[in-house]
Image (cartoon, rainbow, N blue to C red):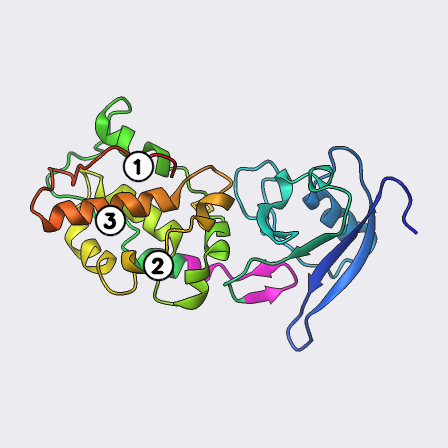
Amino acid sequence: MVDAGRRVVEVRRWAPGGAERWQRYEVDAGADTTVLDALVEIQRRQDPTLAFRYACRVGMCGSCAMVVNGRERWACRTRLAALGGGRLQVRPLYHFPLLRDLVVDMAPYAARLAAAGGALVPSRTAAPYARIAGSGPERAAIDPAIECIGCGMCLSACTMVGHNPRFPGPAALNRAFTLQRDSRDAGKAARWATLLSDDALARCHGQGACTDVCPMGLSPTGSIIRLRAMATRRLLGLEGPQGVVDPPPPGV
Ligand code: SF4
């Protein structure tokens, strides 16, 4: 029997050499208690062996990304009260190597980003410290896609990431979109070669699971659709100076 104000939290546990299991804890929960508050409470007062990752605690860094009640969420911005009164289950992100308990290895995230040409290749013709005007059309085109915090929730939610290790994943494709529209970048041809390979743009099934969970409200799905539109125009010889294409499709 759990008192009013007490919540049962089931946490997926694993340590190297051991077996995965669910462990049950109880915590005091107020109206504003977050999942991260509950985990900190457990670690400080009940079980110092529980491992999880966090940094800013205020919804900026994304390092507390995990799966709560079957959905990717950031623990610091997820209140227990908002999850209803039922069972509360916390497990690590999917599709990442597990290091311990709720801590995953983010190295594959960086590797997928690099493989998709996620770094700006400075153009020799761009002015040093070139800026894209905040009010211009180039900035307006990429604005909806530039606030990625690298949390990895979209990769966890994406079934294609789990299915195909060569698929760059939503965050890398979202990043690639911003670079393919960036006039300062000279890496577009090499990036197109990757994006148009069998394992990149063609593999996205467009179901939008990544967009559903992005805590920043980005739409990797929309960026992928725009990349496909740019690729089509490119193949038809209709590409503008920065691959400028149509306005964003509605609803993505
Ligand atoms: S696109 Fe959104 S969900 Fe994906 S890594 Fe960036 S912030 Fe996280």
- Estimate the spatial distance between the alpha carbons at disc 1 and disc 3, rounded to whole Å: 12 Å
Extreme top residue here? 135
Residue type, mark 3 in image: Arg
What mark, if any, has residue 228 been given in the picture?
A: 3
Of the two numbered discs 2 and 3 on the same chain, state the one appearing first in sequence.
Answer: 2
Is 212 magenta? The answer is no
- Expressed as whole percent of the image width and height from the top left, the position of residue 204 reads 35, 56
What mark, if any, has residue 168 been given in the picture?
A: 2
Asked if residue 55 lies left or right of residue 179, the reply is right
Residue type, mark 2 in image: Pro
The secondary element bearing badge 3 is classed as helix
The secondary element bearing badge 2 is classed as loop
- Expressed as whole percent of the image width and height from the top left, the position of residue 242 reads 15, 39
Is there CB contact under 8 Å for labels 2 and 1? no
Give the crowd class for mark 3: few <14, some 14-19, many >=20 residues within 10 Å. some
Specify start and end residues of the magenta stretch as a single range: 98-109
- Expressed as whole percent of the image width and height from the top left, the position of residue 236 reads 9, 48
Q: In the rendered view, would you say 40 is above or below 159?
A: above
Q: The C terminus is located in which quarter?
A: top left
Write the residue at 31% across / 48% down.
Answer: 224
In front here: 177 or 55?
Answer: 177
Of the two numbered discs 1 and 3 on the same chain, state the one appearing first in sequence.
Answer: 3
Residue 36 in view of the camera: yes
Question: To which residue does mark 1 refer?
Answer: 249
Locate residue 127: give its quadrant.
Answer: top left
Q: In the rendered view, would you say 13 is above or below 42?
A: below
Frontmost of labels 2 and 1 is: 1
The secondary element bearing badge 1 is classed as loop
- Estimate the spatial distance between the alpha carbons at disc 2 and disc 1, rounded to whole Å: 22 Å
